Amino acid sequence: APSDPDLVARARAAKAKLGEKVFVLGHHYQRDEVIEFADVTGDSFKLARDAAARPDAEYIVFCGVHFMAESADILTGDDQQVILPDLAAGCSMADMATAEQVAECWDVLTEAGVAEQVVPVSYMNSSADIKAFTGKHGGTICTSSNAKRALEWAFDQGEDRATTKVLFLPDQHLGRNTAVRDMGMSLDDCVVYNPHKPNGGLTAEELRAAKMILWRGHCSVHGRFSLDSVNDVRARIPGVNVLVHPECKHEVVAAADQVGSTEYIIKALEAAPAGSKWAIGTELNLVRRLANRFAPEGKEIVFLDKTVCFCSTMNRIDLPHLVWTLESLADGKVVNRIQVDEETEHFAKLALERMLALP
Ligand code: 13P
Ligand code: SF4
């Protein structure tokens, strides 16, 4: 539905009043009505980098989810305030790894005698606590656009590449897909650590044999795509290119033609020839926007699954929340500030900076 013209006018007026003081970032999964007001859009890597690119902006309004706003707070100056227009915009995947669970996991690894060989690699989609754990234990953060480079870096950290292991948090699918597709490992090199089972549901023997210890987390949005959705779309649209996000299950990624982050997906469609057909396996706001954008160029873009699949927490940031945020700031009132405590920030920043320094 078209945006309420009154709200659009109010958002414009508040933003104009704030001028250079405010910098609005928008993740690609945001609604059209919100993206319209973003100064920059991007995948999670690009937004982490861009957040730090405007040190003069007093307010960083992050249209995305909680872990992204936390990362922006960690990477920006102390005098800059990061704001999340709706505090309930979390991420169910990030919630699947808590600080207590991860500390317990480290005890299990220590007990099994493997902790010394383990380098943690944590997906951006994790809380600041998990990032701090990662930094403290010599690990790095990664996003879907640099997971391969992060794993290469991690396996170079240990004394011996052959005995080094990676603890990958919290998305088992990105971890497995990167290990198998990009690093030449086999499915047998990966074990899954289940935080709800004693010892993660693994024996010391299994931990010793593994190269990749994958946390049992997943994205419920990308988890909806199945091998059947790939087969169905191939039957329905002959010649279709299947392009999916690496948060999809391994069997979906293995059956796809291309795999990449949201930014990668956009670039691939920009470069696609007229007349080409695409089925995209990622969040629906982005797929719809791309379908509309590229239709005039004769590129046919469909959603990979038949069911509707938004990320409900990304969708919490809507125009009314954005207007409220901008108008409050324009009135000198800071709302919904996201602030990571100093100690967490110190170690989380170490891990994030290792990511930003990846070749
Ligand atoms: P990217 O934008 O980095 O591809 O990640 C998408 C995502 O799932 C964010 O939650
Ligand atoms: Fe989290 Fe999945 Fe939503 Fe991304 S799409 S924010 S991983 S729930």
Image (tube, helix red, strand yellow):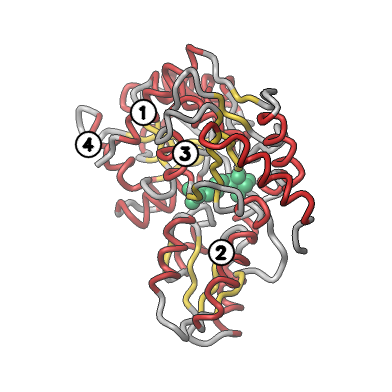
Within-10-Å neighbours for mark 2: few <14, some 14–19, many 20+: many
The answer for how far apart the CA atoms under marks 2 and 1 are is: 30 Å
Q: Residue at x 57, y 41 (%)?
A: 217
Please state which of the two labelled residues, at mark 3 or mark 4, is closer to the viewer.
3
The foreground one among 155 and 95 is: 95
Residue furthest left in the image: 160
Residue at image position (45%, 65%) is 254
Q: Which residue does the image show at 40% across and 38% down from the upper left?
A: 49
- The picture quadrant where one finds residue 305 is bottom right
Residue identified by numbered label 1 = 139
In three-dimensional space, the C-alpha distance between marks 1 and 4, rounded to whole angstroms, equals 15 Å
Where is 15 relative to 198, above or below?
below
Which of the marked residues, 3 or 4, is nearer the chain's N terminus?
3
Residue neighbourhood size for the residue with mark 3, other residues' Cα within 10 Å, grouped as few (<14), some (14–19), many (≥20): many
Disc nearer the start of the sequence (2/1): 1
> Which is closer to the viewer, label 4 or label 2?
2
- The residue where tag 4 is placed is 161
**Displayed quadrant of residue 216:** top right
The numbered mark, 1 or 4, whose residue comes first in the sequence reads 1
Residue type at tag 3 = Tyr
What amino acid is at disc 1? Gly
Residue 68 lies, in percent from the top left, at 54, 36
- Contact between marks 1 and 4 (CB within 8 A): the answer is no
Label 3: element kind:
strand
Pointer 2: what residue?
281
Position of the C terminus by quadrant: top left
Mark 2 or mark 3: whose residue is earlier in sequence:
3
User: Where residue 195 sits in the image (x, y, percent)?
Assistant: 59, 31
